[in-house]
């Protein structure tokens, strides 16, 4: 069973990586993702998305980065983690716009489930990180890094949604970009604080 699961995992990683290549390339080259007119809800959304050229290219670069990390065994765990917020955002968009996307929502939903499978596959690695936050000897919890990560994730998601809506409504987008940068900085600081506690946590576990 274990060799079969390893094969399924490898195939899943490759399929998810390949799925991001065409859409990511279109964004990196700064070409429209669709030719649908703005009278169509999907065309209207992508017209607004495409108008934010820098952000449009940034998402493409992140898609290709996640894909590249996924297909390399040593970085596959990081690739799955980077892939997750991107596919969650894509799935949310296809569901929010509704019937105009047709069956796309089912495809993005399947991609999200496959990504969650990859996260679960690497549970042992994630557990080693969580042990830094949870001290099993006395069951005490160090809440600051975890709170920082969750706040950063929530703020980053809100910033991405705000950027999308700002472009669609022709509203100011600079505040949302600043929020995204602040969320990234907070998340990086929280992760750094977590890793700095790693040696002490490992000594406790031993």
Image: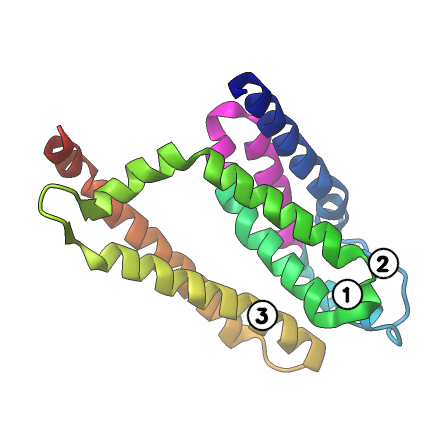
Q: For marks 2 and 1, give the CA distance.
A: 7 Å
Q: Position of residue 77 (x, y in %)?
A: 47, 35
Q: Kindly check if marks 2 and 3 are in contact, taking CB atoms under 8 A apart as contact.
A: no
Determine whether the residue tagged by mark 3 lies in a helix, strand or loop: helix
Crowding around mark 3 (Cα neighbors within 10 Å: few <14, some 14 to 19, many 20+) is some
Residue at numbered disc 2 = 34
Marker count (numbered) = 3
Say above or below: 6 vs 156.
above
Given residues 112 and 36, the one toward you in this image is: 112
Task: Mark 2 or mark 3: name the one nearer the start of the chain.
Answer: 2
Residue 46 image label: 1
Q: Is residue 55 visible?
A: no
Task: Mark 1 or mark 3: name the one nearer the start of the chain.
Answer: 1
Q: Is residue 113 visible?
A: yes
Residue at the spot 66% in from the left edge and 36% down from the top edge: 17
Determine whether the residue tagged by mark 2 lies in a helix, strand or loop: loop
Say above or below: 202 vs 19.
above
Crowding around mark 1 (Cα neighbors within 10 Å: few <14, some 14 to 19, many 20+) is many
Q: For marks 2 and 3, give the CA distance.
A: 20 Å
Determine whether the residue tagged by mark 1 lies in a helix, strand or loop: helix
Question: Left or right: where does residue 126 sit relative to residue 43?
Answer: left
Of the 4 image quadrants, the one containing the N terminus is: top right
Question: Left or right: where does residue 155 sit relative to residue 24?
Answer: left
Q: Kindly check if marks 2 and 1 are in contact, taking CB atoms under 8 A apart as contact.
A: yes
Residue at numbered disc 3 = 161
Colour pattern: rainbow
Question: Left or right: where does residue 67 sit relative to residue 47?
Answer: left
Where does the magenta region start and end? Answer: 57-79
Crowding around mark 2 (Cα neighbors within 10 Å: few <14, some 14 to 19, many 20+) is few
Say above or below: 28 vs 206.
below
Where, by quadrant of the figure, is residue 21 drawn? top right
């Amino acid at each position: 069973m274990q060799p079969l699961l390893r094969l399924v995992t490898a195939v899943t990683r490759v399929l998810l990586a390949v799925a991001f290549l065409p859409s990511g390339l279109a964004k990196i080259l700064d070409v429209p993702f669709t030719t649908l007119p703005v009278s169509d809800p999907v065309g209207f959304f992508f017209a607004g998305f495409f108008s934010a050229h820098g952000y449009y290219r940034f998402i493409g670069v992140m898609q290709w980065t996640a894909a590249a990390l996924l297909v390399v065994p040593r970085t596959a765990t990081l690739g799955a983690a980077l892939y997750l917020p991107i596919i969650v955002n894509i799935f949310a968009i296809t569901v929010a716009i509704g019937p105009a996307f047709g069956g796309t929502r089912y495809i993005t939903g399947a991609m999200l489930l496959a990504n969650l499978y990859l996260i679960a596959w690497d549970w042992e690695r994630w557990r080693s990180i969580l042990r830094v936050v949870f001290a099993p000897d006395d069951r005490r919890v160090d809440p600051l890094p975890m709170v920082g990560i969750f706040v950063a994730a929530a703020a980053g998601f809100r910033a991405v949604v705000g950027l999308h809506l700002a472009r669609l409504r022709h509203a100011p987008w600079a505040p949302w970009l600043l929020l995204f940068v602040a969320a990234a900085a907070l998340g990086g600081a929280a992760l750094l604080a977590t890793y700095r506690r790693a040696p002490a946590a490992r000594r406790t576990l031993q």
